[in-house]
Amino acid sequence: MTLKLYEPQWSWKNETEKWLIKKFEGKTILNFPCGKSQVGFRVDINQDFKPDLIADLKNPLKYFEPDSFDVVICDPPFSMFNRHVWYNNMARIAKEDFLISTPYMRTYIRNFDLYKTYLSQQNANFYLRLWLHFKRNTQELSRYD
């Protein structure tokens, strides 16, 4: 028997896909990492998901300019949550909204305010996904830059 060290199975429920599409209708969306999701411009390091672009989440500004998408949706692997620089860089790509799916996490993202928190059910109601929705702060924030 051959043991596979990593076999991707990640996907959202159809209801989550529909919710995201409806919520951000008419906006440009970056979905990074996308997994099996079909929402927006899809980016993932795993070519098996057939993303629009193969890229590494650790350095998102290598691939995208700041303010290049209206909305950035990010559902990273849990192993990424012990590193904080990447999600501030990911948020810089968003002109308006940054949505991150996370385990419980208190965080500060430069130039963004926490707008809402959502929960979605996953895997036959066994697992709840927490979504933190940040909106770009339109006030002068030069003290943070």
Image: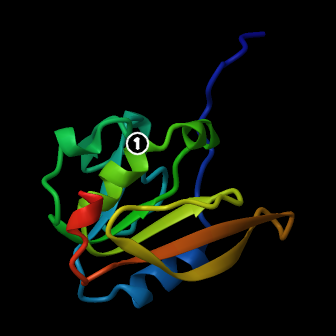
Location of residue 15 (image quadrant)? bottom right
In the displayed image of the protein, which residue is found farthest to the top?
Answer: 1
Please tell me how crowded label 1 is: few (under 14), some (14-19), or many (20+) other residues with Cα within 10 Å.
few
Please indicate whether residue 130 sits to the left or right of residue 65 in the image: right
Residue 33, above or below 121: above
Residue at x 36%, y 62% (from the top left corner): 110
In the displayed image of the protein, which residue is found farthest to the right?
Answer: 126
Residue 5, above or below 132: above
Residue at x 22%, y 75% (from the top left corner): 28
Image coordinates of residue 118 in percent, x first then y, are: 63, 80
Residue at x 72%, y 14% (from the top left corner): 3
Q: Quadrant of the N terminus?
A: top right
Helix, strand, or loop for circle 1? helix
Location of residue 131 (image quadrant)? bottom right
Q: Quadrant of the C terminus?
A: bottom left
Please indicate whether residue 41 sits to the left or right of residue 23 in the image: left
Residue 126, above or below 56: below
Image coordinates of residue 73 in percent, x first then y, are: 41, 65
Q: Nearer the viewer, residue 61 or 36?
A: 61
What's the amino acid at mark 1? Val
Location of residue 91 (image quadrant)? bottom left
The residue tagged 1 is 85
Q: Nearer the viewer, residue 144 or 121?
A: 144
Please indicate whether residue 12 sits to the left or right of residue 23 in the image: right
Image coordinates of residue 136 in percent, x first then y, are: 31, 77
Residue at x 49%, y 54% (from the top left corner): 36
